Image (cartoon, rainbow, N blue to C red):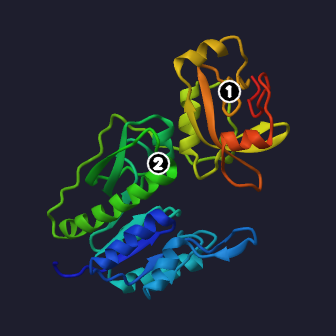
Amino acid sequence: MAEPLRVGFAGTPEFARAALAAIVDAGHVVPLVLTQPDRPAGRGMKLQASPVKQEALARGLPVLQPRGLRLDGRFAEEAAAVQTALTQARLDVLVVAAYGLILPQWALTCATHGALNIHASLLPRWRGAAPIQRAIEAGDAETGITLMQMDAGLDTGPMLLARALPISNTDTAASLHDRLASLGAALVVEGLPLWVSGHLPAKPQPTEGVSYASKIDKAEAAIDWRLPAVQIERRVRAFDPFPGASFELDGQAVKLWRAQVADAGAGTVADAAAPGTCLRPEPDRLLVACGDGVLELLEVQRTGGRRVAMADFLRGQAVAAGTRLGSTRAA
C-alpha cells in the first residue's frame, strides 16, 4: 500500500468499531481515538466501555472520552485537552463514525485533510441519527454507505464515495446494521488514500430527496394497531433490537420481534373487527386486525422471559378470539 496515513478516529458503537479495526488492519497509524464516556449497562448497571474503546484498548491505541467538545461550554477543560491532543497528533485526516457528539469547527479542521464521516445511508436521504431504522420503517428498497467530507451542518457535507445495499423484506435493524458496518469499513479503507492524494473529488449533495432520520424514541415502541399491517410489520423489524415493538396483553407488556402481513383472505375476516382484535383462525396462530389488513404475530417475548415462537406462547397462555391487544394510542 501507499505510505501509511495518520488517522484520528471518533466513534462509539459497534458500527464504528468495524471501521476502526479496518483502518488499523490496513496499516494506517491511529495516534488518537475519541469515544463517548463509559455508560452504565446490563442488569447490574455497571460502567461499560463503548465498543470503540474496547477495540482501541485491545490494539493499544490512546483513547480520550470527553463529555463535550465546545471550548466555551460546560466541559471546556476536557475540550481544550482534546484540541491539544489532536494538534499534537499531526493528523492527515480525522474519520468519524457514529460518534455521538457534535464536532465544532476546530475539530473539523484539526487534520491536514479535514474530517470524513462514514454515514449509513445514501445521502441526502436519511440524514441524522437513525438512518438504518428509518430506511426499514419507510419500506426503502435499498440503503447504503456514503463517505462524506464533514462540514458544520447535519450530514450536509460533500460526498466522496457511495455504495448501495439492498434491504430485504426480512432485514431487521440489527442485520442491516452488520452489513452496513462491514460496507462502511471497506469503503473508508478504499477512500482514505484516494482522498489524501487528491484523486477523490468531492461532490455536493443533491438539493432534492433530502430526508431526516430522527432519533428513535422509546415511546415509538408501543404498537398502534390502527396503522396498516404492512407499516406495523416494518416497524417491528426497524425497532429490533431497540427499542423493540410492544403491545399489552392482559395488562402485561409483550415484545413483538417477528411478524408478517397475513394473506388477503384474512382481511375479509378483519373488516368488522376493531384494530387490535385477535382473530385466531387456528390454535397455534395469532392474527390481529389492523387499521388496514391483518398481521400475524410470529415471535414474542414476555418481560423477563426469552423470545419464543407464537405457537409456544399460545401453549402457555390461551388468547381467545375477540381479545383486544393494548398499546393502541388514543384517537
Find out whether the residues at labels 1 and 2 contact each other: C-beta distance under 8 Å.
no
Image location of residue 299, percent across then percent down: 63, 43
The amino acid on which the numbered mark 1 sits, given as a three-letter code, is: Glu
Task: Please identify the quadrant where the C terminus is shown.
Answer: top right
Q: Name the residue under label 2.
A: 132
Mark 1 crowdedness (10 Å alpha carbons): few <14, some 14-19, many ≥20: few
The amino acid on which the numbered mark 2 sits, given as a three-letter code, is: Ile
> Closest to the observer: 242 or 9?
242
| Residue 13 numbered tag | none
> Closest to the observer: 211 or 55?
55
Of tags 1 and 2, which is closer to the observer? 1
In the rendered image of this protein, does residue 263 appear above or below residue 125?
above
Would residue 133 be visible to someone looking at this image?
yes
Q: Residue furthest right?
A: 251
Q: What element carries label 1?
A: loop
Please name the residue shown 46% across and 45% down the image: 171
Would residue 129 be visible to someone looking at this image?
no
Q: Mark 1 points at which residue?
A: 282
Q: Which of marks 1 and 2 is nearer the N terminus?
A: 2
Image location of residue 244, percent across then percent down: 64, 47
Please name the residue shown 82% across and 43% down the image: 252
